[in-house]
Amino acid sequence: LWTTANIIDENIRTVREKVGSDEVILGLSGGVDSSVVAALLHKAIGTQLTCVFVDTGLLRYREGDQVMAMFAEHMGVKVIRVDAEERFLAALAGVTDPEKKRKIIGGLFIDIFDEESSKLTSAKWLAQGTIYPDVIESAGAKTGKAHLIKSHHNVGGLPENMKMGLVEPLRELFKDEVRVMGVELGLPPEMVYRHPFPGPGLGVRILGEVKKEYADLLRLADHIFIEELRKHDLYDKTSQAFAVFLPVKSVGVTGDGRRYDYVIALRAVETIDFMTARWAHLPYELLDLLSRRIINEIRGVSRVVYDISGKPPATIEWE
Ligand code: XMP
C-alpha cells in the first residue's frame, strides 16, 4: 500500500542499504526539498548526516536563525552554518545586471559549499533534494541543483581521490508528495507549504545593486507583508507573495517634515504552474493597511506600490 508512511519507511531502508555506515553531506537551503531530505536522512542515519547551510545574507527576515532553530536545536540535526553575508555583498558590489547577479550568487554559493564539504573529508555521499520535475525538465538549471551536481563531479573542490556518490531520495516524487512527506516527518506545515523562494534570494528582489541597507529594509517590508497575509488568512490562497526593493527615492511628508526615501513594491500572484500567473486581487483594506504599516514602521521607505502585472507579459520576479 502506497501510504506516505510506507514511502518513508521504504526510503529509509534504501538509504541505509546504500550508505551503510558512511557519512553523508547535504546542502540545506531552508527550502522545502532540502528540508524534507534533511528530516528524512536524519531519521534514517542520524549523526551520519552533516548539513551545510550557507547563509548568503540574502535570505528573508530571521530565516537563517529559523533554519538553525528548527534543524539544529529542535531536531538535533548536525548543521554547519556558514555566515557568508559579507562575501556575497562584496562579490555583488557595483553589479547591477540581473543575469550577472544570478551568476555571481550561484557561483559563490557553490564555491562556499565546496569549501565546507571538502573539510568533511570522511563524507562519502552527497545528498540532494532533487525532485521528479528537476529530473525531467531542465528546471534543474533554474533551481541550481543541476549545477551543484556538476560542480561536485567535474570541477568541485573535493579531493581528487574522493568520489562522492549521490543520494537523492526525492527523485521520484512530485512537489505535493514531498510536502505530504515533510509533514509526516514532523516538519511544521507553515514551513512545508511556504511560497517558493528563488535560489538567488533577495539578490533578485533588490533591483540593481545589492546593498546591506537595501536588504535590511526589504526584509522588514517583506515580513510585514507575509505576516498580514497570514493574519488575514490569505497566505495559502496566494501562490507567491513578496516585497521588492526599488532603489529610487520618492518625496513624502511626515508631520512637519519632508522625507525623501525609497519605494517598496508588493507582488502577489495566483498561479497553478508559475508559467502564467494573474496578480492577486487583494482587498483594498489590506493593501491600505500594508502601505501604512510599511511606511510608518520602516525608516527609509516613503512609498508603497502594488504590482498589477500579469504573467505574461511580466515575469513573477522583477529581475
Ligand atoms: P518568473 O520570475 O520567471 O518566476 O516568472 C517563476 C518562478 O520561478 C522562481 N524563480 C527562480 N527560482 N532561481 C530559482 O530557484 C531563480 O533564479 C529564479 N527566478 C525566478 C520565481 O520565484 C517563481 O516562483
Image (cartoon, rainbow, N blue to C red):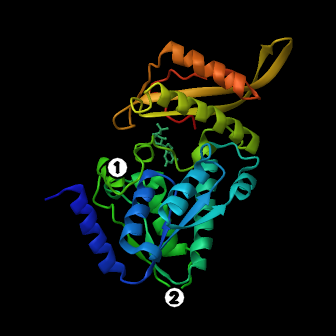
Give the image location of residue 237, x and y in percent: 39, 29
Q: Label 1 belongs to which residue?
A: 179
Q: What's the residue at 54%, 85% (across, down)?
A: 160
Quadrant in which the C terminus is drawn: top right
Among numbered discs 2 and 1, the one appearing first in the sequence: 2
Q: Amino acid at mark 2?
A: Asn
Residue most toward the left?
1
98 sits to left or right of 33: right
Taking the spot 57% from the left edge, 34% from the top edge, the residue there is 318
- Residue 272 drawn above or below residue 280: below
Whole-number angstrom distance, CA of label 2 to CA of label 1: 37 Å
State which quarter of the image contains the N terminus. Answer: bottom left
Coordinates of residue 234 in the picture (x, y in percent): 43, 27
Closer to us: 16 or 240: 16
- Measured from the top left, where is residue 138 in percent x and y? 39, 54
- SS category of the residue bearing label 1: helix
- Residue 312 visible to an observer of this rendering: no
Q: Position of residue 45 (x, y in %)?
A: 39, 74
Q: Neighbour class for label 1 at 10 Å: few (<14), some, many (≥20)?
A: many
Ligand 1 is within 8 Å of the C-beta of the residue at disc 1:
no
Query: What's the residue at 61%, 53% (across, down)?
Result: 65
Note whether 220 is above or below 79 in the view shown. above
Please tell me which residue is depicted at 75% across the width and 54% down the height of the picture: 90
Q: Is residue 208 above or below residue 130?
A: above
> Given the current orientation, which residue lies at the most extreme top position?
256
Numbered disc in front, either 2 or 1: 1
Say the numbered circle drawn on residue 161: 2
| Quarter location, residue 105 | bottom right
Residue 285, disc: none
Q: Quadrant of residue 214?
A: top right
Q: Ligand 1 within 8 A of label 2's CB? A: no
